[in-house]
């Protein structure tokens, strides 16, 4: 019941919504009460963050920083790992986006990754779904 309490609150429109996604997925997998509506709402929120070419912004702020890989891609890859049977298409998309992001196509992207030490952590996380 305590974990389900996350569904009683409206979370800020940012990477925080992924906490509610993971909690609801865990509750669902354990056969406990979960909020399917909030789960889908927040998964749709992740879609609204997507900018293309593997990049997300962190919610409606437009912020693009290390949370793209530390939070958004990491939690999406975790989702893909545990929800592959139940939600194969979304999981495929999350993996595809992560691989695009990991390719480090441009100087600005590379600078963000290297200055924040994100790339090594992201590459470890991406191996979770390999």
Image (spheres, grey):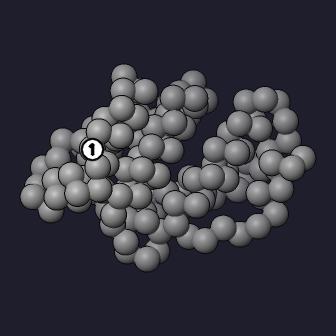
Seen from the viewer's position, the closer of residues 100 and 107 is 107
Q: Which residue is mark 1?
A: 119
Mark 1 neighbour density, 10 Å: few (under 14) some (14–19) many (20 or more): many
Q: Secondary structure at mark 1?
A: helix
Tell me if residue 12 can be seen: yes
**Residue visible at 45% across and 43% down in the picture:** 74
**Residue visible at 75% across and 36% down in the picture:** 28
**Residue visible at 72% across and 45% down in the picture:** 24
Q: Is residue 31 above or below residue 17?
A: above
Q: Quadrant of residue 86?
A: top right
Q: How many marks?
A: 1
Q: Residue furthest bottom?
A: 61
Q: Is residue 12 left or right of residue 109?
A: right
Q: Position of residue 64 (x, y in %)?
A: 33, 66
Q: Is residue 90 left or right of residue 121?
A: right
Q: Position of residue 13 (x, y in %)?
A: 56, 70
Q: Is residue 99 above or below residue 118?
A: above
Q: Quadrant of residue 96?
A: top left
Q: Position of residue 62 (x, y in %)?
A: 37, 74
Q: Is residue 127 left or right of residue 40?
A: left
Q: Is residue 114 above or below residue 29?
A: below
Quadrant where the C terminus is found in the figure: top left
Seen from the viewer's position, the closer of residues 1 and 117 is 117
């Amino acid at each position: 019941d305590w974990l389900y309490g996350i569904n009683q609150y409206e979370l800020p429109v940012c990477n925080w919504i992924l906490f509610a996604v993971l909690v609801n997925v865990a509750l669902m997998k354990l056969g406990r009460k979960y909020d399917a509506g909030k789960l889908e709402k927040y998964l749709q929120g992740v879609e609204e963050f997507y900018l293309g070419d593997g990049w997300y912004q962190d919610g409606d702020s437009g912020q693009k920083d290390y949370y793209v890989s530390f939070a958004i891609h990491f939690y999406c890859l975790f989702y893909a790992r545990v929800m592959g049977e139940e939600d194969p298409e979304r999981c495929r998309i999350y993996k595809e986006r992560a691989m695009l992001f990991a390719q480090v196509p441009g100087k600005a992207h590379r600078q963000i990754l290297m200055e924040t030490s994100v790339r090594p952590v992201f590459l470890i996380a991406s191996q979770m779904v390999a």
